Image (cartoon, rainbow, N blue to C red):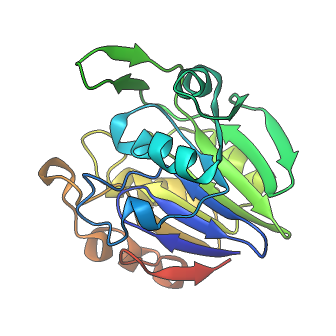
Amino acid sequence: MRVTYHGHSVLEIKTRDHSIWIDPFINGNGQAAIKVGDITADVILLTHGHNDHVGDTVEIAKANNSLVVAPFELAEYIGSLGVETHPMHIGGSRTFDFGKVKFTQAFHGSSFTQEDGTVVYTGMPAGILFSHGGKTLYHAGDTALFSDMKLIGEFEKPDVAFLPIGDNFTMGPEDALIAAKWIGANLTVPIHYNTFPVIEQDPESTFTSKLGNKGKVLQSGESLNV
């Protein structure tokens, strides 16, 4: 599978037959070079309900007849907006025709703020393990460091991990380095940084340079093969 980073926490996964997006926050994401109208998506996977992760999910899903897979409460909310959803939850996995999805713990919050200012509770936040073709990708979502990351490394053995390093709302680089060690992926890529002033980081000097050949900074629009 080919994975393209579009800034913030946005991943585009291309397999031979499907296009899968994780947390497609495009409008309002100054790092994204792609436009919402240019996106084709068979499936959208969501980690949690915050606006900078749900992003443009509803618009994309309606334009593409996409399936949205998300934790139960978030899936119920998105479904109420006229989108096809498949609800899951933490610890649960399911094999779809496009790949296997498993939701993991994440220590964060989850709510969506509507245009009128109303805040909708969207359940618990999650990370995502996505497997296809014998390879596994781990998108940690927004999270603090937690010790069960050791178990993710030991039992799930992800080939590539995408970890937040922005600090303030999530792990900072120091904790993310511990997470990377515990997870033990062949390659770790930083996400969720430099989108807003409060999460500004130098990803190379504070993070990937300390991981050696097991760390890589992806520029927005840059891809890698997993």
**Residue 187, above or below 78:** below
User: Where 25 sits versus 103, above or below?
Assistant: below
Relative to 108, is 63 above or below?
below
Q: Position of residue 190 (x, y in %)?
A: 41, 64
Q: Is residue 144 visible?
A: no
Tell me if I can see residue 112 in this picture: yes
Work out whether 209 lies above or below 129: below
Quarter the N terminus occupies: bottom right
Which residue sits at x=63%, y=39%? Answer: 148
The image shows residue 223 at horizontal and vertical percentages of 52, 80
Residue 146: give x, y in percent of width and height: 52, 38
Q: Residue furthest front?
A: 63
Closer to us: 209 or 18: 18
Residue placed furthest toward the left: 197
Q: Position of residue 14 (x, y in %)?
A: 66, 71
Q: Hey, which quadrant is residue 73 in on the image?
A: top right
State the residue at coordinates (64%, 64%).
184
Instruction: Please tell me which residue lies in front, 149 or 56.
Output: 56
**Residue at the (40%, 74%) spot, across then down:** 208
Left/right placement of residue 136 relative to residue 125 reads right
Q: Quadrant of residue 192?
A: bottom left
Left or right of 156 in this view: 73: left
Name the side, left or right, on which 15 lies relative to 2. right
Q: Quadrant of the C terminus?
A: bottom right
Q: Nearer the viewer, residue 114 or 89?
A: 114
Is residue 150 left or right of 198 when viewed as pictured?
A: right
